[in-house]
Every structure is written in structure tokens, then in C-alpha cells.
Image: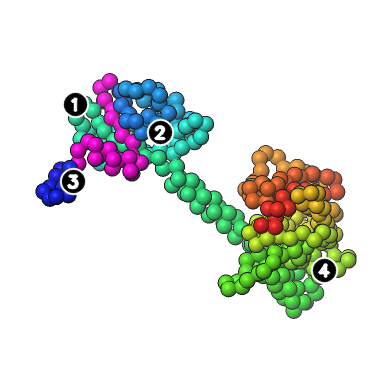
Amino acid sequence: MSWEGSSALVWDAERLRIATNAAGIALWSWNVDTDEIALDERARALWCVQKEGVVTFEELSGRIHPADLERVRTAFQETRAQAGAYEIDFRIRQDGEIRWISARGQGADVGIVDRIMFGVFLDVTGRKKAEEAREMLAGEMSHRVKNLFSIASALTAIAARSATTTQEMAHDLTQRLTSLGRAHDLVRPSPGEMREKPALLGDLLWILLAPYGGEVAPNSRVRVSVTEVQVGGITASTLALVVHELATNSVKYGALSTPSGTLDVRCTVRDDEVVLVWEEQGGPPVTAPNGGMGYGSKLVARSISGQLGGAISFEWLSSGMVATLRMSRARLAA
């Protein structure tokens, strides 16, 4: 393709290669009779193929993720019968790393030359990771909404059990919901609000746990005893999510599900490590859960390890569940 002019452009092989390199496009061709596949330099690098020349699908299939292999094999075999453009996304192993590849071309023998079909590979790892992140966020939001409904139901039941009149119940429930609102304001400031210093761990814990233990008092069923540790704006919401999850489980199944149950939260600081102990007593008998962790437990573990630089462990004692959270003090203050 060309046109006249002092700056005329000609789409020859060299310029097409410049364009495909700029777009990150890898080229392949497939001989439908011999099943041989030819890869350009970028495609060989993408598949970690060292030798030059042709390869076969069976040779490449060893690099395809086992969970995707049969799907890709079936799609590869059906491309000739499929009319129009096709696009197949799948994972491959690349030097110990998982990469997402998109294979694209035309089916129904469109553009076939001398029994050879042509197409491209694109590295779509970035897009796939973004999609996975969105799915995780959607799952997290769904989980939080379900927990909010559970907490609202539990708080209503607690208020109904302790109140003698509807007015008293309404007052009690309003106080508890107001405490939840205060916690939200603490970890998620309103637009335009500026916090010049981090919140204190004790303040955050009292606000988050007040709805479960009633008024702050020495004989409260929820007791918090922590050293003066700062929680930064970045990690406050993460810690609130963890506390929210633990409290929800306690209200559903643990010490806070019964009037006589108590919760003690205490922490110590060892060098750059903050150790927070969550100890429940007086609730129904507890046993270690069977099988793998649920979504909430995975969310807690991932939040503590990924954002708070620590880990969480559980003990299922006859007196109640004990959770030990180990967090980086520097991360916590960020």
C-alpha cells in the first residue's frame, strides 16, 4: 500500500514489523496439513521456544496451563470450521511465571495461503490481572454487604434481648448503629476532612467493638487493653475489615453470640512487631473448622499478610477461640 507525496509511506515487510513490534504483536502461521506452526521472534520469546523454524501444537502444549489445555486443544482443532474472527485466551508457563496469551485469527480458511493459516498472539496478562482484581473487589464488596446484614440482624437481636420496651430497644439499637457510623468516619474520613496524625489503635478498637459490648466500662463484656500504637490512614480500613470479620464471626458463632460471653483484646509491641491477641470466653463450645478456609478467613489472612506485613493464627480452646495477629508496626502506621 502506498501513495504519492514527499513523505509517502510504504507498508513493506520492514515497516509492518516496526508496527507489530510497537503494538506488542507476535505472529504465527499454521500448516493445516502437516500441523506445523511457525513463530516469529516475538512469538518464540513469548513461548520460550529456543529453536528457530517450525514447531507443532503438541510441542507448545507442554507450556500451556493444564487447566486450559483441553479447552485450547479443542478450540485449535475447530478454528477451520468457525466462521469469522476468533479469539482464545489462555495461560502459559513462562520461566516459572504464569502469563495470559490471546490467540487471534480468522476461521473458515479465510486468508489461507498454500494451506497455511495466519494469526497473532498478544500478551494480555495485564488485562487479565486487572479483571481478576475487579472480580476480587466485587467479591469483597458482596462479602462486606452480607456481613453488614448479619451484623444488623445480630445487633437487632441483642437489642431486643436486653430491652424491656420498644422505646428502650430503639434507643439501644440506635446507639449501636451510631457507633458503627463513628467507626466508618474514623477509617473513612468524609470528603474534605484532613487528619494530621494517625488514629490510635485503642480508639479504633473501642469504636469498632462498642456495638458488641455496650458502654465502655470495667465490667463490659468487651475489654480492650492495648499500648499506644498508631494506625495510619492507609491501613486503618484494612484493620477495621479484620476486626469487623472477627466480630461478625463471634456474633454468629462465638462468645458474643451469648449474653454471658466475653471478649478480651490486648496487644504488645516487640521491636517492630505488634502482637494483637483476640481471646473469647464464655460462648458455645468451639471446634476447629473442617476443610479449607472460608472466603472471610482468606480475606483476613490475605489482608494481614499483604497489607499489614504479618500473619494470623487461631487456637480453638475449650474456653473459646483465640486469634493472634502479628503485624508490622511500620506497616500499621503507614
Give the alpha-carbon distance from disc 1 to disc 2, as whole Å: 26 Å
Q: Residues within 10 Å of mark 4 (few under 14, many from 20)?
A: some
Task: Name which residue lies at 35% across and 41% down.
Answer: 24
Which of the two discs, 4 and 1, labels the residue nearer the N terminus?
1
Task: Name which residue lies at 58% across and 54% down.
Answer: 140
Q: Can you identify the residue that label 2 sits on?
A: 46
Label for residue 114?
Answer: 1
Q: Nearer the viewer, mark 3 or mark 4?
A: 3
Q: Quadrant of residue 162?
A: bottom right
The residue sitting at the right extreme is 219
Task: Name which residue lies at 75% across and 55% down.
Answer: 250
> In the rendered image of this protein, does residue 108 appear above or below residue 208?
above
Q: Nearer the viewer, mark 1 or mark 3?
A: 3
Q: Quadrant of residue 231?
A: bottom right
Q: Residues within 10 Å of mark 3 (few under 14, many from 20)?
A: few
Residue type highlighted by circle 4: Val
Q: Is residue 25 magenta?
A: yes
Label for residue 4?
Answer: none
Q: Position of residue 241 (x, y in %)?
A: 66, 57
Tell me, what colour scheme is on the image? rainbow
Which of the two discs, 1 and 2, labels the residue nearer the N terminus?
2
* Mark 4–mark 1 CB contact (< 8 Å): no
Label for residue 9?
Answer: 3
Give the alpha-carbon distance from disc 3 to disc 4, as whole Å: 78 Å
Label for residue 216?
Answer: 4
Residue type highlighted by circle 2: Leu
